Amino acid sequence: MAASLLRLARPRRALLTLSSLRIPLSTQPHAPSPTPSSARGLPHFLYFLAAAAAASAGTTVALCDSGLDHRAGGKESTDLVVRGERKAGGKESTDLVVRGERKRVPQEFIDELASFLGENLTVDYEERSFHGTPQNSFHKAVNVPDVVVFPSSQDEVQKIVMTCNKYKVPIVPYGGATSIEGHTLAPHGGVCIDMSLMKKIKSLHVEDMDVVVEPGVGWIELNEYLKPYGLFFPLDPGPGATIGGMCATRCSGSLAVRYGTMRDNVINLKAVLPNGDVVKTGSRARKSAAGYDLARLIIGSEGTLGVITEVTLRLQKLPSHSVVAMCNFQTIKDAADVAIATMLSGIQVSRMELLDEVQIRAINIANGKNLPEVPTLMFEFIGTEAYALEQSLLVQKIATEHHGSDFVVVEEPDAKAELWKIRKEALWAGFAMKPDHEAMITDVCVPLSRLAECISASKRLLDASPLTCLVIAHAGDGNFHTIILFDPSQEDQRQEAERLNHFMVHTALSMEGTCTGEHGVGTGKMKYLEKELGIESLRTMKKIKAALDPNNIMNPGKLIPPHVCI
C-alpha cells in the first residue's frame, strides 16, 4: 500500500538527444492582467501615472506579484489547484486551483541546458507531469514543469540556476517528493531541479559527531550508513524524505520532542543563490556568533531563496537501550493531559505520540492488528536499561492518575520496530479506510499548556462531521495532525474538509499557536500567514526575497502570499 502511494517505482526518464529536444511545449492561454488590489476603485490611468512617476524619480516599484488576481490565494483562500494567471495564497479565493502565469520556454534556453547536462535533462511529458504532481497531497496543478533536470554536482546546479536567471525562467527544487503543501507544484512551468543524483555522503567526522552530505541523501539511508559507527541523525519525517527537502521545509518528526527540529540539527549548509553565487553559511564549529545566521534563513525558505547543495548535520549517539510503552485512555483530553504532565515532570521522553480511536481503527484495518480502538499514547524512553524502565514506571503512574489503562511496555527489538513502523505509516493506513479519497492534513502546533484544550475542541468538531477524520499528534511539543479524508469529486466534501481545517487553524492561532508546526507553507498555508505573523513580517520576508531574487525565479508562488506588497 505504502509503496504504491509513494510512487517508489519512478517512471523511466526519457533521455533525449539534443536534436530530439526541439519539440513544441504546451502553453496556457493568458487572461488579462487585473489591476492590483491597492489600486482597485481608482481609474487605471492614475495607477499607471503613480508607477511612472516613481520610476522617473529613480524609485524601484515593487507593488505586488505581477500578472496576478490578488483575490486568489491569500487570506482565507481555499485554492487546491494551479492554473491561468492566478496563484494560491491570494485573498478570499475558493477555487480548486493554485494559479500562476506561464510563458513559453525558448528553445535556445533548453539547448543551453543540454550543452552541459547532456542526457540528464528531459522534456518528456510523463516525466514532467510526474514531477509537477505532488505524490502525497490533494494540491493539484494545471501547469507542469517545462523541463526536468538531474544535476550531479554543485557546479551543474550553479550553471542551471545562472541559465535560468539569464532567461528569467522559474525554478522548482525537487527532493524526495514527500511534502504535502504543494511545495513542488510548478504554477509557472519552468525548470524542475531533481536533486536525486546528488546523494553522496561526502565526509563523516565520528569524533566530532557530524556528517557532510549532499541534498539527495535520504534520512533513512543516512541512518543505515551511520549505524555501524554507533551514530544516527535524529530527525524522522515521512519515509522517502531527503536532507535537502527536510532543510527547505524546516521539518521535524516524532523525535523532535528530545532532539529539536531541522534548524537545531544543521551546523551549516551550502546553497546556490538565484544569481549563481554559492554561499556557505558557516564553519563546522558546534556554535558560532559570527555574523547573520544565514543557515536559519535558508532552512525553512522552501526553495524561494536558493538551491541547497550541501548540508553539515549534527549527529547523536545511538542509545544503548530503549523501551516503548503504550497506554489507552477513555478520552483524547485525558491522553493530552498525560502528555502535558509528563513534560512538566521533567521526564525525558524521546517520543510521545498520540493517536485517536479512528487512527487506531485505520491501523487495525491496514495492518491486520487488533489494537483497542481508543485514544492511545505511545512513548519511547532511552538510556541504560535501568534508567529507561524507571522512566516508564514514572509515566505509568502519571497515566494512571489520568484514567489511563492497559499500560504495556515493549522491549523486544522487532516488536518495537513494528510499532514505530505502524506509527510511521499512519497516513497510508488512513487511505486504506477510504482508498478513493484525498487527505487534507492539518499541522497546527500550540503552546504545550493549550494542547488538551485545542485538540479536544477540534475532536468535538471532527466527530460531528460526516467525513472520516483521524487525529495523530507529536504530543510532547504541542503539534497535532488531523487527516481529513474527502472525495475530491464531491464539492460539498471538499468544502467540509476546508471548514474543519479552517476551524483548527484559527483555533490554534487564537491560542498563540501556528498553522504549521513542521510541514511548511508551500501554497496550502499561505492564506493563514498574515493572521499568524502580521503584514509587516510578511513584507520583511518579501524584501529579503526581492533582494536575493529580483527576477523572482526561485520557486515563485510559494511561501509569501501574492497580496503582500512592498
Image (tube, rainbow, N blue to C red):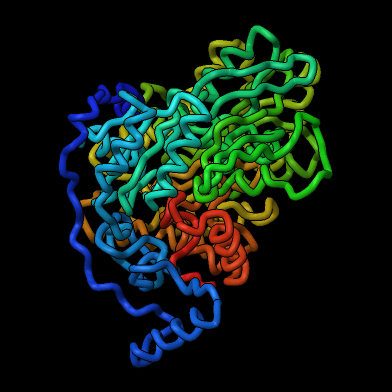
Does the image show residue 205? yes
Q: Quadrant of the N terminus?
A: top left
Q: Is residue 258 above or below residue 168?
A: above
Q: Quadrant of residue 405?
A: top right
How far from the left and from the top, in percent, is residue 531? 55, 69
Q: Is residue 38 left or right of residue 285?
A: left
Q: Is residue 511 above or below residue 216?
A: below
How far from the left and from the top, in percent, is residue 463? 41, 53
Residue closer to the observer: 532 or 447:
532
Residue found at x 39% / y 91% = 46
Residue found at x 34% / y 79% = 35
How far from the left and from the top, in percent, is residue 265? 69, 34
Q: Quadrant of the C terminus?
A: bottom right
Does the image show residue 1? no
Residue found at x 80% / y 40% = 345
Q: Is residue 203 left or right of residue 427?
A: right
Residue closer to the observer: 502 or 286:
286
Q: Is residue 15 above or below residue 225?
A: below
Residue closer to the observer: 290 or 395:
290
Q: Is residue 55 above or below residue 141?
A: below
Residue closer to the observer: 113 or 287:
113
Residue found at x 53% / y 56% = 515
Tell me how many marks there are.
Answer: 0
How far from the left and from the top, in percent, is residue 95? 28, 64
Identify the residue at the far top of this view: 228
